[in-house]
Image (cartoon, rainbow, N blue to C red):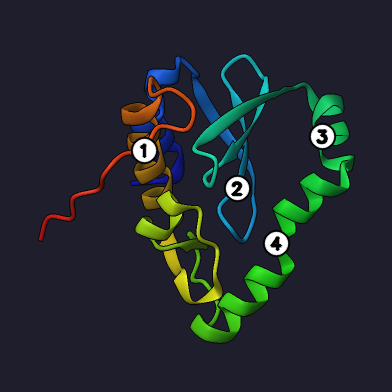
């Protein structure tokens, strides 16, 4: 499965018509265009897709130092690269699934994951938790 197919399958419930991936960060953040040409920002850690608008609005978004720091994640990617090696084509660094849910970005919790798998995982989690009130707590059951 390609990352675009993963978006269509796992994030299709958002109503976005995923058309083209424009950029991918080392930590799995993605800028993509929908069928109407609107650009969007996918943040796997926040389980969110943010509409950016046109090219100019996207440039403005990336002009923010905070956005660049999150996109580059230099300290995280350096730590992951040192511990895990380089990512193969189509893979990114990410917290392991449980750490991703916990928001734990400790270097020891990072793994290499195919981008399509990260997109599918986060889309399914986002779909299942989208209606929970902010601050909700939930229990994760790990099934062998």
Label 4 sits on residue: 73
Q: Of the numbered discs in the image, which one, if any, rests on residue 61? A: 3
- Residue 97, percent from left and from top: 36, 56
Q: Residue at x 47, y 62 (%)?
A: 95
Cα separation, mark 3 vs mark 4, equals 16 Å
Disc 4 residue crowd, few under 14, some 14–19, many 20+, Cα 10 Å? some
- Residue 38, percent from left and from top: 67, 20
Q: Comparing marks 1 and 4, which lies closer to the viewer?
A: 1
Disc 3 residue crowd, few under 14, some 14–19, many 20+, Cα 10 Å? some
> Label 3 near label 2: C-beta < 8 Å?
no
Which structural element holds mark 1?
loop
Label 2 sits on residue: 29
Look at the image and tell me in which quarter the C terminus lies: bottom left
Which structural element holds mark 3?
helix
Q: Of the numbered discs in the image, which one, if any, rests on residue 137? A: 1
Between residue 82 and residue 46, name the one nearer to us. 46
Closer to the chain start, of discs 4 and 2, is 2
Q: Is residue 87 left or right of residue 69?
A: left
Rendered view: 83 above or below 17: below
> Label 2 near label 4: C-beta < 8 Å?
no
Q: Of the numbered discs in the image, which one, if any, rests on residue 127? A: none
Q: Comparing marks 4 and 2, which lies closer to the viewer?
A: 4
Which structural element holds mark 4?
loop
Cα separation, mark 2 vs mark 3, equals 14 Å
Closer to the chain start, of discs 1 and 4, is 4
Disc 2 residue crowd, few under 14, some 14–19, many 20+, Cα 10 Å? many
| Count of marks overlaid on the render | 4
Cα separation, mark 2 vs mark 1, equals 25 Å
Closer to the chain start, of discs 2 and 1, is 2
């Amino acid at each position: 499965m390609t990352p675009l197919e993963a978006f269509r399958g796992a994030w299709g419930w958002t109503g976005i018509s995923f058309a083209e991936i424009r950029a991918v960060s080392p930590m799995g953040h993605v800028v993509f265009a929908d069928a109407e040409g609107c650009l969007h920002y996918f943040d796997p850690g926040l389980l969110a897709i943010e509409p950016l608008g046109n090219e100019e609005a996207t440039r403005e978004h990336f002009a923010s130092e905070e956005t660049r720091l999150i996109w580059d994640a230099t300290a995280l990617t350096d730590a992951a690269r040192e511990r895990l090696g380089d990512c193969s084509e189509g893979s990114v660094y990410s917290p392991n699934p449980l750490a991703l849910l916990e928001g734990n970005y400790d270097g020891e919790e990072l793994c290499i994951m195919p981008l399509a798998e990260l997109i599918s995982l986060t889309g399914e989690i986002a779909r299942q938790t989208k209606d929970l009130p902010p601050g909700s707590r939930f229990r994760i059951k790990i099934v062998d």
